[in-house]
Image: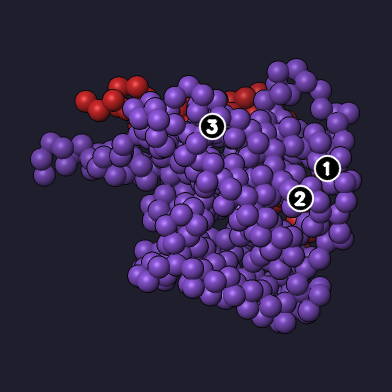
Amino acid sequence: MGTKGHMIAKRRSGLVFLCIALVVASFVVAGPRSAFLMIVGLGFGFVLEGLRFGFAGPWRAIVHDRDGRGLCAQLLAIALSAIVIFPLLAAFPNELNGAYAPIGVAMIGAAFVFGLCMQIVMGCGSGTLVNAGSGNAVAALALIGFVLGSFFGTLHLAWWTSLGSLPIYTLQGLFGNVSGLVVTLVGLLFVASITFWRAQPGKRLPGKRLVLAAALLAGLAVLNLVIAGQSWGVVYGLGLWGAKIVTVAGVDLASNGFWGAPAHAMRLQQSILTDVTSLTNIGLILGAFVVMRWRKEPGQQVAPLVPASWLIVALAGLVLGYSARVAFGCNVGAFFSGISTGSLHGWAWFAAAFCGSIIGVKLRPTLLRTERITGGAQ
Amino acid sequence: MKKNESLLPSRLAVGHCSVGFLVLLMLLDFWQAVPINPYDAPAPVALGSGAAPEAAHCTNF
């Protein structure tokens, strides 16, 4: 083994040690559940970054390049999760919670805006975390906006929701447990069929890498539910981080409608190492970082943008967080977990966000301009 | 040297900044939050624990 090979081996040993240390520290400080969730979060990061499984990219690919492989892989992951999760939720209704939320005017509008913005920063909820962890400068800036935006969204959530919402509908509630699962799978198959029809030949079905990623992601999502008692989510944790930052800055949130509510006040008071979504978010970022460092070369940085485009990225990140909060989740909490647990709002979120994404794909070349080619798109 | 390499921090540097952000957040949390009571930790796994889920999710309002 040459000097370079020895260096790589040494670095990788250090990364393994870092992961083990992180899990052990979570166990010692916050108990076994926190340690298990940290492992799940790291797993999400390994799969998403290591197997290059994303959400925003495949949505762009089907619209822009007529490449449906990534979107079909997403649908497969959701279907595999649903097949396990529906029976679990039916069997253990007192211990496990689905990602249920109401469909509303603001929720649909916010999902549309989220879809648009995620194409501007080229990252959704999980994508922004993964990309930031793997060293993408655009995502790192967007993450700061996402954290603040998620927090600001909590401040106005009650007002947005009051604009008009339906009761919470689930497919289990509408059709029963078995039929609800069948309707979910038929719905996913229907979307997959449209994707298949829209995609170019040779870009219709996911290859082995994406199928493996979908299966692993589904397995991790089930583990998240079994360990935490709730579905995989991202946005709540980011909003909580924002709330903690402003609390340390001296802002009193006790009188706020959201953070003053007992359940959220308790979360704000307690450590993020006891908060489910914070734990998996931390694991996700670190998992992506570990994958980036594991590679022989970390890869090239994104092309530099003109200053105005950096400002747009920061604003888009802020709006991404705000809209995700108002829409009751991002691609993870609403789309992936919503649909895989039977929430009707997950389907409404998907439709609205996809429409927004189409606009975002068209706007991105105009809004994000590189420094090298000032007249062209990135 | 390519232009973008000279203008932007490398992936390595940005990745380390992201990890630094997490470390800073945890330090801030350590200072702000009430100390964790290890004797009050929930069951290792929610399934089979008999306890209702208390965790917060983005669908909560």
Q: Secondary structure at mark 1?
A: helix
The chain letter for the residue carrying disc 3 is: A
**Pointer 1 residue:** A160
Q: Secondary structure at mark 2?
A: helix
Could you confirm whether marks 2 and 3 are on the same chain?
yes
The quarter of the rendered structure image containing the C terminus of chain A is: top left
Q: Amino acid at mark 3?
A: Val
- Badge 1 crowding class, 10 Å Cα cut-off, few under 14, some 14 to 19, many 20 or more, is some
In-front residue for pair A285/A125:
A125
The chain letter for the residue carrying disc 2 is: A
**Pointer 2 residue:** A107
In-front residue for pair A235/A58:
A58
Residue A258 in picture, x, y percent from top left: 83, 38
- Badge 3 crowding class, 10 Å Cα cut-off, few under 14, some 14 to 19, many 20 or more, is many
Q: Is residue A71 visible?
A: yes
Q: Amino acid at mark 2?
A: Met
